Amino acid sequence: MPIPPKPAPAPGGDPDAGRALAAEVRERRRALGLSQRDLAELAGVSERFVRFVEQAKPTIQLDTLLAVLDALGLGLAVRRREPR
């Protein structure tokens, strides 16, 4: 069975931003000595959702992501992009 292609990022989206966020969450979770299950319980989300965040899935819910970041002591910041 062929592997389906990855969905295209949203217009103006930066696929590297999702990967950077995933890496930061994974590194912080590991630094705190938490399993994905531990983090899911702390954040009140499913373990599957934590996996999706760490895999940089493009369709995660923002409010749920914010709960995961809060459990890790992280925040989300918005910054202006440089023109392309």
Image (cartoon, helix red, strand yellow):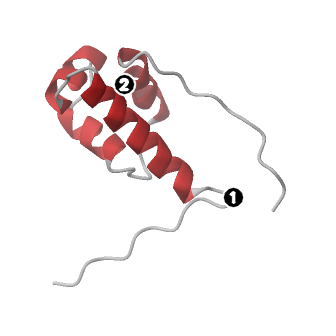
Q: Which residue is mark 1?
A: 12
x, y percent for residue 34: 20, 23
x, y percent for residue 14: 60, 56
Q: Earlier in the sequence, mark 1 or mark 2?
A: 1
Of residues 16 and 59, which is closer to you in this image?
Answer: 16
As drawn, 15 above or below 61: below
Of residues 6 and 76, which is closer to you in this image?
Answer: 76
x, y percent for residue 82: 81, 51
Q: Give the secondary structure at mark 2.
A: helix
Q: Is residue 48 left or right of residue 74?
A: left
Q: Is residue 76 left or right of residue 36?
A: right
Of residues 1 and 72, which is closer to you in this image?
Answer: 72
Q: Which residue is mark 2?
A: 68
As drawn, 70 above or below 45: above
Dot 2 amino acid type: Val
x, y percent for residue 60: 41, 43
